[in-house]
Image (cartoon, coloured by chain):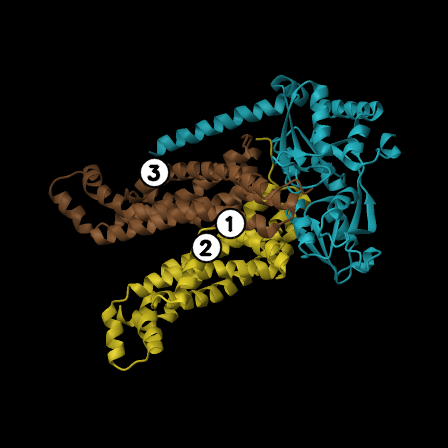
Chain colours: A yellow, B cyan, C brown
Amino acid sequence: MDYTFQFGELLPYSDLIARGVLSTVILAIVTTVLGCLLGTLGAAARAGKQTFLSRAVGVYVELIRNTPFIVQLFFIFFGLPTIGIKLTAGEAGLLAMVINLAAYSTEIIRAGIESIPKGQLEAARTLGLSRTQTFTRVVLPPALEKIYPALTSQCIIVMLGSAVLSQISVEELTFAANFIQSRNFLSFEVYMVITVIYLLLAILMRQGFKLIHYFMFPNLRARS
Amino acid sequence: MMSVFKSCLKFVGLIGLCITALSANANQLDEITKRGMLVVAVPQDFPPFGSVGSDLQPVGYDVDTAAYLAESLGVKLELVPVTSANRIPYLQTRKVDLVISSMGKNPERERVIDFSRAYAPFFLGVFGSSDAAVASAADLAGKTVGVTRGSVEDLELSKLAPEDAVIRRFEDNSTTISAYLSGQVELIATGNLVAAKIAEKGNSRGLKSKFIIKNSPCYVGTHKGDTELLTKVNELIVAGLTSGKLDELSMKWFNAELPAELKL
Amino acid sequence: MSVFSDWDILRNLLLAARWTVVLSLIAFAGGATVGLLLTMMQVSGRTLLVRFTRLYIELFQGTPLLMQLFLVFFGLSLMGLEVSAWFAAALALTLFSSAYLTEIWRGCIESIPRGQWEASRCLGLSYFEIMRHIILPQALKVAIAPTVGFSVQIVKGTALASIIGFVELTKAGTMLNNATFEPFKVFGMVALLYFLLCYPLSVASRKLERKLNVAR
């Protein structure tokens, strides 16, 4: 191997990398919050009776889950302006991430809801709780607890997927990698360092979710 | 189980060593003649230098230049489509013998690869719709300019543009051009000949030259230290310029003869 | 410039979709082979092997597929190994999918109640006999649905190979968009073709799962 690694050459770009990390983190947080909220709404629609809304949500979920993220991204960024909807690169990227996570979390949360025994629902209704109350107080908490690991893994997958946003000039972590690579041509060193940063972000995110879990399900904690 | 794993690793390492040894010792020109094949990186998203025909095969001035070199060397040609961003890594990692990809020369690049003499003209400029009021780099303040990451345009513009100009860097030329055509950026920095091609499209919003950044002719790139190959390529370019072969290609793709200073 | 009719666009996309299919199949075969090996290591109970698999899964599930592709593509070359975009894409996707498949399959094997292990031990069966005759036949059944489901992720993952210059469906899409500049139409068609590839797999996975649940 006649190649010497020059990791030191990356130091002048630490600012750029830091900014990339910040963007990726912000994108991940906003996507996680919005995606899970929309997913909960979508799951509520899907779990109910077969209405137009539940079918529309079903079609949306299938469309998103069965096409690659990068194609969705290109469609939003390049395709939508031709019919008059123009979004900046950042908006397009965020939108693509949110609709992606929303589709997956709809399916995941729905599976959680369906695993709740029907008897609990009936019991809650008999006790005089309204439909909304039954959903938010009786069905949703144990459902979320059940699918929490799956949901959080999906959030991490979507965060890692944001690497593709660099393709439409969003200045996140991979953009920083590509940018540095185009300036000093040290492709391997750059991608190595950035990959390690992604790994750290993923680990950090998982720990963060564990912390949230601890605070979100206090009752369940007491019981177990 | 672990011993199997270890021996596998050793085996992979051994292959690695053999290949390194091969590529390190051989003279690349001999290597090309021996395998009977010239592998060239060409653009496919940068008309008229390189774009795709209706069968998705690359066509253009760079492609024809590559064909001319292969023919003169008496070997077959293999084209590898690359982007502005990955063409130098391709050369560094010896995935290709030559880069003929409308590539400009600058000190950063000269540190990592070698350049031939110029084979095609290229005037870098900023282009935009006819109603955009831009006449110099200073006017870019507050404007959004699209550029292909890692291109000479990118490097030059990054130096010239005022602080509050927004430079949007895209992965390859096709994304940059698409970003302009779909209205995602107001202006683009690219070559004059490329801009002329874009202006032919229906939704180019009357693409016009705003100002020229730099005369940055195109060079053939070779792996650092491939001296024999570089000398041969230079000979062939000079031959092509004197025989009128390159002029012929220029007429075909640029609708003009090559400028006189290129032939000096 | 407008040498492309709608039929030209579709024809080129269909031709490129072949490579998406081939790459998906290779990645699936590779991922399944490596994944099987890793699953065996994971359930072997040997500390070192289990730790190695955990690290492997952590690495490949914790980093973007795009980065893995870049590292394989440019990294192997620096080590002196000649890698084509083909090979790099196939290798990176193999590594990526094996990590996920291992995770899925381990879950399936562990879903078989511990009691069965103990019962089999009492009957005097060896580790491999228990695996071969008791655990695997049941685990295999459980594994089919999620495995088919994951194959959708592999097909979609191949789209990223476009970024290192491998001409498959997505790359053909960007090339055609560049040549025709009809992004709405081109990327719409690209999305549709992916949907046609992936949706049957999704439906099959769901049907299999339902069938299995009824059978139990």
Viewer-closest of A52 and A81: A52
Left or right of residue B2, residue A17 in this image: right
Sequence-wise first label, 1 or 3:
3
Viewer-closest of C48 and B132: B132
Location of residue B92 in the rendering, given as x and y in whole percent from the top left corner = 64, 34
Residue under disc 2 on the same chain as residue under disc 1? no
Q: Quadrant of the C terminus of chain B?
A: top right
Labels 1, 3: front one: 1
Residue position marked by numbered label 2 in the rendering: A63
Residue under disc 1 on the same chain as residue under disc 3? yes
Report crowding for label 1: few under 14, some 14 to 19, many 20 or more residues within 10 A (C-alpha): many
Residue under disc 3 on the same chain as residue under disc 2? no
Q: Are marks 2 and 1 in contact (CB under 8 Å)?
A: yes
Residue type at mark 2 is: Leu
Residue type at mark 1 is: Ala
* Vertical relation: A193 (above or below) A224: above
Location of residue A199 in the rendering, given as x and y in whole percent from the top left corner = 48, 52
Location of residue B119 in the rendering, given as x and y in whole percent from the top left corner = 79, 32
> How far apart, in angstroms, are the residues tagged by discs 2 and 1?
9 Å
Mark on residue B60? none
Instruction: Label 2: state its secondary structure.
Output: helix
Residue type at mark 3 is: Leu
Location of residue A47 in the rendering, given as x and y in whole percent from the top left corner = 34, 66
The residue marked by circle 1 belongs to what chain? Answer: C
Residue position marked by numbered label 3 in the rendering: C37
> How far apart, in angstroms, are the residues tagged by discs 1 and 3?
34 Å
Residue position marked by numbered label 1 in the rendering: C191
